[in-house]
Amino acid sequence: MATIPTITAVSYLNTIPFVYGLKHADNLRADLLLAPPSECAKNYIEGKADIALLPAAVVPQLKQTSIITDYCIGAVGPVRTVTVMSNVPIGRVKRIWLDAHSRTSVQLCGYLAKCKWHIEPEWLHMADYSVVETPQLEDAFLLIGDKVFGYEGKFAYVYDLAVEWREVTKLPFAFAVWVARKGVAYDVVDELQHALTFGVEHIWESVTESQYMGADNGLTAYEYLTRNIDFILDEEKHKALKKFWDAGIRIVPRSY
């Protein structure tokens, strides 16, 4: 009997086309494990999953692992859900609180601090999001995912990290990519590719089947998925990943 693989993926709005494709795939037999980005990495590293949608920052650290599909969670313009928010210009920021749910965004924030903003802030681990409600004047907050929507309009300055990256590098960005450990069957990878293709080709259907329908009948979610997220892992995004990895910047926030 063939072993049924486990696939772990991000449980955010930006992945619902992928999840839709996986759930509706005709020939892909797999168990699906949904989690925040950092937990996806943990699930994969601990052997709880054979295939994963992983934060791009962790991929170079993994042995016996390869990128396996032509899909990603990426952006060619504003991504909207990976932002640094503050009440002072970024050049005046002294402390940056870092979202505990993301590894790639943390390292990208470190890259931008060094290469674009030219600041050396204190990096703080943000597990309790109540700190965002009582910011100090020179604080900034790296926020990712669906929670960003709840803070839009509450800060004087918002820095979209995909836009900031592009201004420095002239490249798009890939925040998460699909990987598998060595030994996963080729036919499983092929069926995964087909499932993801199906999902990306049925974005509206993925919204209607999700929790994101809302009072506007899903129009906000659909607009975000079609305007802010780019799912294709093309040559330009591969170049961006190499540049990001080669920079070798490692931010390790301290707990407060």
Image (tube, rainbow, N blue to C red):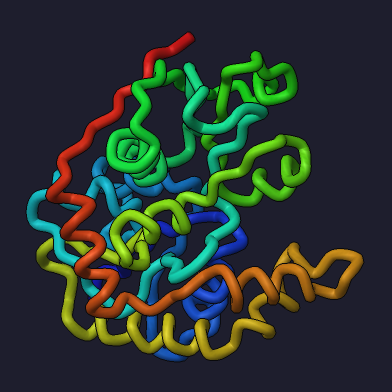
Residue 120 lies, in percent from the top left, at: 34, 22
In the picture, measured across the screen, residue 116 lies left or right of residue 80, that is left
Farthest residue, direction top = 256
Residue 149: horizontal and vertical position, in percent? Answer: 71, 49
Query: As drawn, is 63 to the left or to the right of 178?
Result: left
Residue at x-position 33% and y-position 46% = 41
What's the residue at 69%, 76% (across, down)? 222
Among the 4 quarters of the image, the one containing residue 169: bottom left
Pick the residue in front: 172 or 29: 172
- Identify which residue is drawn at 32% across, 75% down: 233
> Can you say whether 199 is above or below 125 in the image?
below
Residue 1 in view (yes/no): no
Count the marks: how many? 0
48 relative to 78, above or below: above
Residue 31 visible, this angle:
yes
- Relative vertical location of residue 201 with respect to residue 136 in this rendering, above or below: below
As drawn, which residue projects farthest toward the right? 215
Residue 29 position, x and y percent, is 39, 77
79 and 26: which one is in front? 79
Q: Is residue 155 left or right of residue 125?
A: right
Image coords of residue 130 (percent x, y): 69, 21
Q: Quadrant of residue 124?
A: top left
Q: Nearer the viewer, residue 169 or 151?
A: 169
Residue at 53% in and 61% down: 79
Quarter that holds the N terminus: bottom left
